[in-house]
Image (spheres, rainbow, N blue to C red):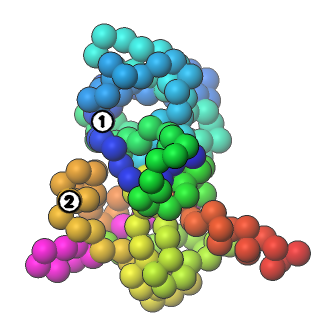
């Protein structure tokens, strides 16, 4: 379980394909505090630490994860948003995030708003998830508020300077793929209504 408040960014230092799996090596500031079997959100996808090296740790993304996320598009040198799992008793500064990416979306526009940035995204509405104005959405592991919903397949968020500086949003451009996790409460309500 995560909050969508990015703790740090990491740098992809190695990629190794093995069958349908992708082993990802990441350099991160909190490396000395990690242990094997720990859960870490990588661009919003929960992955388990499987190895620790002197300057990096490794996680494995299985085929299902690669199909549902943008992790299969990573290149050595890419920046990933990182968050270690939530501790019971801590403040929930973002929203409840499982680290289970629902689908990917595409950045369609970035608008400089003189002190903040508006990012617009499009996704496949066939995934059946719902968004509401001022509701929560997790984009590349970042807990954000939906600003507007111009259509059933698109939404926008606004990024404050702190988030821009401390996440990989600063490198996001139109056409780039992002991981999306829709609000868990909304997913449960939607499932109940469909019954």
Report whether 158 appears left or right of 153. left
Name the residue at the right extreme: 195
- Whether residue 178 is visible, yes or no, is no
The correct choice, above or below, for 107 with respect to 51 in the image is below
User: What residue appears at the point 42 percent right and 85 percent down from the top-left corner?
Assistant: 148
* Residue bearing the label numbered 2: 162
Q: Which SS does the magenta portion mostly show?
A: strand
Give yes or no for residue 58 being in the magenta stretch: no
Position of the C terminus by quadrant: bottom right
The correct choice, above or below, for 53 with respect to 70 in the image is above
User: What residue appears at the point 59 percent right and 42 percent down from the top-left corner?
Assistant: 65
Report whether 21 appears left or right of 119. right
Q: 33 or 108, which is in the foreground?
A: 33
Q: Kindly indicate the quadrant of the structure image that contains residue 27.
A: top left
Q: Which residues are magenta?
A: 103-118
- Whether residue 113 is visible, yes or no, is yes
Residue 53, position in %: x, y? 36, 11
Residue 112, position in %: x, y? 16, 76
Name the residue at the front extreme: 89
Q: Which mark is residue 10?
A: 1
Q: Which sits earlier in the primary sequence, circle 2 or circle 1?
A: 1
């Amino acid at each position: 379980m995560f909050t969508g408040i990015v703790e740090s960014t990491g740098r992809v230092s190695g990629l190794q394909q093995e069958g349908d799996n992708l082993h990802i090596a990441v350099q991160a500031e909190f490396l000395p505090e990690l242990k094997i079997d720990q859960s870490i959100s990588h661009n919003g996808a929960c992955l388990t630490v499987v190895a620790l090296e002197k300057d990096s740790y490794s996680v494995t993304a299985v085929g299902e994860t690669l199909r549902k996320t943008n992790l299969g598009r990573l290149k050595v040198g890419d920046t990933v948003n990182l968050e270690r799992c939530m501790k019971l008793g801590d403040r929930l500064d973002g929203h409840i995030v499982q680290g289970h990416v629902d689908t990917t979306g595409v950045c369609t526009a970035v608008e400089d708003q003189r002190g903040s940035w508006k990012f617009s995204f499009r996704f496949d509405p066939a995934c059946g998830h719902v968004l509401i104005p001022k509701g929560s959405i997790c984009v590349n592991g970042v807990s954000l508020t939906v600003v507007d919903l111009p259509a059933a397949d698109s939404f926008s968020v606004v990024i404050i300077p702190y988030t821009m500086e401390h996440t990989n949003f600063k490198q996001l451009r139109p056409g780039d793929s992002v991981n999306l996790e829709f609000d868990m409460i909304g997913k449960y309500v939607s499932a109940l209504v469909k019954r």
